[in-house]
Amino acid sequence: MISVTTATLSDAPDIDRLARLAGLQVDASPALGLPHARVLCAKDSRDGTFLGFLVAWQVADEFELLDLATEPGERRRGVASALVLELINTAQQLAGSAVFLEVRSSNQGARAFYEKHGFRMVHERKNYYRDPVENAVCMRLDLESAEGHGPRR
């Protein structure tokens, strides 16, 4: 069973370790202190084993999903979905209007995952990423009103 909660300073070492493993540039301790940051972590509800994390920023009524990672041995078991659904739920509770994200154009798995959760491509940023140079696909999920009706399809 997966439990998703707001991350605390005690989660920072696990977040930083997994971020490095996933090739992400995350520094959890400072992020946890930012008022606009939403840092979530997923754990096994039976034994508290760390399973993954998500970092997002809230700017006014919009949210931007910046980083998402799952422990390699826990992939395809619903961890990432649980994290994204909790972010969507949080955004709705805070009267959010949309959630945005960017993904490498070649990352078909991630793009399909986000589309499954209602995100749609809104535009592409040419040559956005480095090492290797690649376009970024910008995706958006429009949210219903704060009444919690779920993502629009």
Image (tube, helix red, strand yellow):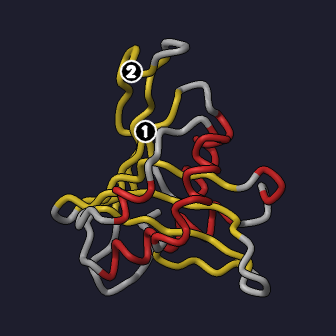
Three-letter amino acid code of the residue under disc 2 = Tyr
SS at badge 1? strand
70 is higher (above) or lower (below) than 139: below
Residue found farthest to the left: 60
Secondary structure found at label 2: strand
- Residue of label 1: 102
Judged left or right of residue 46, residue 127 is left
Kindly identify the residue that appears in the image at 44 percent across and 49 percent down.
27
* Residue 92: image location, x then y, percent: 34, 76
**Which residue is pictured at 48% across the width and 72% down the height?**
7
Name the image quarter holding residue 142: bottom left
Neighbour tally class for label 1: few under 14, some 14-19, many 20 plus, Cα within 10 Å = many
For the residues marked 1 and 2, what is the alpha-carbon distance in whole angstroms? Answer: 10 Å
Circle 2 Cα neighbour tier, 10 Å, few/some/many (<14 / 14–19 / ≥20): some
Q: Foreground: 26 or 13?
A: 13
Q: Nearer the viewer, residue 31 or 122?
A: 31
Q: How many marks?
A: 2
Tell me the quarter of the picture where residue 89 sits: bottom left
Residue at numbered disc 2: 128
